[in-house]
Image: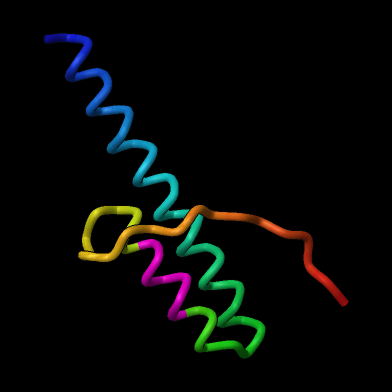
Amino acid sequence: MARLLETATAGVVAGRERAEAWRALGDQWLGHGRPEAAMNAYRQGLAAAGLSGAAPLPLVLRPAGP
């Protein structure tokens, strides 16, 4: 039982961390004048947190280009 609780808790924490990463990415897009990209990132954050019916996409961070 303790192992099951530990596994469930780890999943919640990981989901929250992914949601926070998506939110930060959305904030960056918004700061760069890209509201459409920001909204997509915010939606992914909601999905990662389990607050949306959509399945979250994997978060892939890329270095900023020119």
Name the one closer to the observer, 20 or 5: 5
The residue sitting at the right extreme is 66
Give yes or no for residue 52 being in the magenta stretch: no
Which of the 4 image quadrants contains residue 40?
Answer: bottom left
**53 left or right, relative to 34:** left
**Residue visible at 50% across and 88% down in the picture:** 36
Q: Main secondary structure of the magenta part?
A: helix
**Residue 57 coordinates in the image, percent (x, y):** 45, 59
Up the image or down, 62 lies above or below 26; here it is above
Which of the 4 image quadrants contains residue 6?
Answer: top left
**Residue visible at 32% across and 28% down in the picture:** 10
Give yes or no for residue 40 being in the magenta stretch: yes
**Residue 16 coordinates in the image, percent (x, y):** 35, 46
**42 left or right, relative to 33:** left
Model colouring: rainbow
Badge count: 0
**Residue 33 coordinates in the image, percent (x, y):** 62, 90
For the magenta stretch, what is the residue range? 39-45
Quarter in which the C terminus is drawn: bottom right
Up the image or down, 45 lies above or below 33; here it is above
**Residue 30 coordinates in the image, percent (x, y):** 56, 82
**19 left or right, relative to 21:** left
Quarter in which the N terminus is drawn: top left
**37 left or right, relative to 6:** right
Which of the 4 image quadrants contains residue 42?
Answer: bottom left
